[in-house]
Image (cartoon, rainbow, N blue to C red):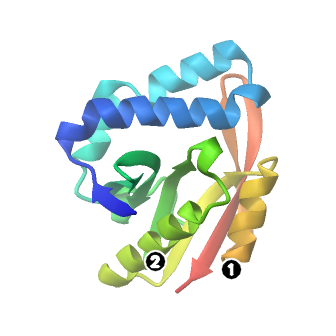
Amino acid sequence: MELKECTLEDLELLQKISIELFTDTFKDQNTEEDLKNYLEKAYNSTQLKKELTNKNSAFFFLLDNEEIVGYLKLNIGDAQTEDIAENAVEIERIYIRSNRKRKGYGTVLIEKAEQFAKEKNKEVIWLGVWEENLSALSFYKKKEFIQISSHSFFMGDDEQTDLIMTKTI
């Protein structure tokens, strides 16, 4: 296994994997139109380029035998989507290919987030997870994340609830 930090040279590949994994994770719970509109907004080239060049964000591909099996996006400072805690790192995106889940890859990505936080002298890792993503919720609880609050996430007109979870490291 290998973790590779993404650069601008990875923009097209990041866009492809982001769309693939988000779609795979959420297509069955959302309308095709809402999903399409979200993907066009969140993962267009301009948006991803802006995120890749933000000094307070970092993307990592997780590779196994040179195949991308997942990826991670971390934010610090003003790149975080919310002000959750002092000295915090946000895990904004953490995705594993569905055929590769439950094989330890998620643990590798969480450990990378913890290492990143320690390198940046941060004390808290936080993330938002859809309340109906029961397998992800179970995983985060096993990794000692606790729910501290929630917020609304809109997929088109569909208001969904993300649970905000934190872990002190």
* Rendered position, 64 above or below 9: below
Quadrant of residue 9 in the image?
top left
Quadrant of residue 57 in the image?
bottom left
In front of the other: 128 or 8 = 8
Relative image position of residue 56 (x, y in whole percent): 29, 60
Q: Earlier in the sequence, mark 2 or mark 1?
A: 2
Q: Could you tell me which secondary element the residue under label 1 belongs to?
A: loop
* Rendered position, 6 above or below 56: above
Give the residue at mark 2: 114
Quadrant where the N terminus lies?
A: bottom left
Q: Residue at x 62, y 61 (%)?
A: 103
Whether residue 147 is visible here, answered yes or no, is no
Relative image position of residue 147 (x, y in whole percent): 74, 70
Give the residue at mark 1: 144
Q: Residue at x 19, y 40 (%)?
A: 8
Q: Amino acid at mark 1?
A: Glu
Q: CA distance from mark 2 to mark 1?
A: 12 Å
The residue positioned farthest toward the top in the image shown: 33
Relative image position of residue 39 (x, y in whole percent): 51, 25
Q: Could you tell me which secondary element the residue under label 2 belongs to?
A: helix
14 relative position to 140: left or right: left
* Rendered position, 75 above or below 14: below
Q: Residue at x 50, y 54 (%)?
A: 92
* Rendered position, 85 above or below 50: below
Q: Amino acid at mark 2?
A: Glu
Relative image position of residue 141 (x, y in whole percent): 74, 72
156 relative position to 1: left or right: right
- Mark 2: give few (<14), some (14-19) or many (20+) Cα within 10 Å: many
